Image (spheres, rainbow, N blue to C red):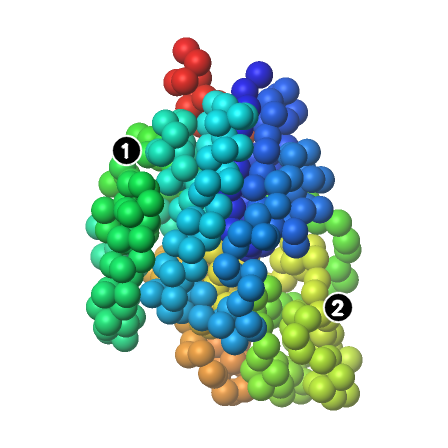
Amino acid sequence: MSKIVFFCIPAQGHTNPTLGVVRELISMGHQVWYYSYDLLKEKIESAGATFVSCDAYDTQQKLSPKDATKIGKNMAFSIKILVETTLALGDVVCGHMEQLKPDCIVADSMAVWGKAIAVKLGIPFVCSTTTFAFNKYSARIMKQSLKDMLSMVLAMPKVNRQIRRLQENGYPFKNVLDIMQSDENTHTIVYTSPEFQPCADTFSEKYAFVGPSIRPSNSHVEKKKEILVYMSMGTVNNDMLPLYNKCISAFKATDYQLILSVGSLVDIKRLGTLPENISVYSQVDQIAVLKKADVFISHCGMNSVSESLYFGVPLIMLPQTSEQGGVARRVAQLSAGIVVKKRPSAHALLHSVRELAGNPAYKNHAKALSAGFQKCAGAKGAAGKILQVCQSRNP
């Protein structure tokens, strides 16, 4: 029996793919401790892991709503939050690890404290990557805009100051690439397929492309029209009342069925009286909806895109961050969706949906990616990779 410790950031999209792996490990008789945040406690405990709260140490939990929206958009600010969390958690978690003596640490690629503590204590380490794996080859494919590159250059002095803070506290990071770039010598689980991952053949044998982790649906969705359009802008930055109003305006006089998930920040009453073909909810069972949907209008978070493609649903993509922009570009490169600008008109939304729904090539490309996802090793393959690393400590 192995002792395995997981670390993750306070984000549904980074946590959800790991829960099937946790269940798989526990079903095989192994012990799992999961360091995360109270908003995810119930989910993690339902997977069978021992939950350990990090709320008291994580700077991100203390941010104002305005500052929280900067995470993922402002590189210097994001690195500052990661560094401050690493330093706050460091001594406490190192003490825990020295007592527990785990066989392996599995940390999200953004939970840099997991990797830092593993290296510091000499514990075998596995990186969990819920976005694309990133190296110099995939970076060319996932090219950033001129604005993104300029922002990165301007942020570097502040970023370098944060890296020095880590170095001064004994953490082995030389530069920002040690945080951002996938390491060829690190065992890494990537929750996508070789077909969807850009330049998958340029990564070492230590990388396991296991495919997305798709949970079972727990509700039924009725399809009332020939074409069902689903729209969601994710669970974080979704306070977008003007966009939702445009979407309703675009589809209210059509024969399309629209299911719109607006999140908890928008008062549904402010959307007014809805026509019979449009339903609006604070949240939905996304898997259940995607099983019936024909088109998904999405912010292009990796989790949402993976779920959409798993069910062969092509996408209309409105990325809000550079990471989401990279995912959107990859979908467009593989002809499984259309990218539109951040603030599209009602006409542009309707035109894009008509193009997607009326051209079977998009659906066929989405189905091809679905086939690639479904032949991946999944949670069993990820668990096998982790146990392989555990055995390297206890041959």
Is residue 217 left or right of 111 when viewed as pictured?
Answer: right
Q: Which mark is residue 224?
A: 2
The tally of labels here is 2
* Residue at image location 25% in from the left, 41% down from the top: 202
For mark 1, what is the residue? 185
Relative depth, front residue between 370 and 281: 281
User: In the rendering, at what x and y percent does residue 84 appear?
Assistant: 42, 55
* Residue at image location 32% in from the left, 49% down from the top: 166
Is residue 358 left or right of 134 when viewed as pictured?
Answer: right
Q: Residues within 10 Å of mark 2 (few under 14, many from 20)?
A: few
Image position of 9 with respect to 51: above or below: below
Q: Tell me the kind of residue under disc 1.
A: Asn
Image position of 325 with respect to 20: above or below: below
Relative depth, front residue between 44 and 335: 44
* Residue 371 makes an appearance in the image: no
| Rendering quarter of residue 173 | top left
User: In the rendering, at what x and y percent does residue 187 appear?
Assistant: 36, 32
* Residue at image location 31% in from the left, 53% down from the top: 165
**Extreme top residue here?**
395
Relative depth, front residue between 130 and 53: 53
- In what quadrant of the picture does the N terminus appear? top right
Q: Tell me the kind of residue under disc 2.
A: Lys
* Residue 221 makes an appearance in the image: yes
* Residue at image location 53% in from the left, 25% down from the top: 99
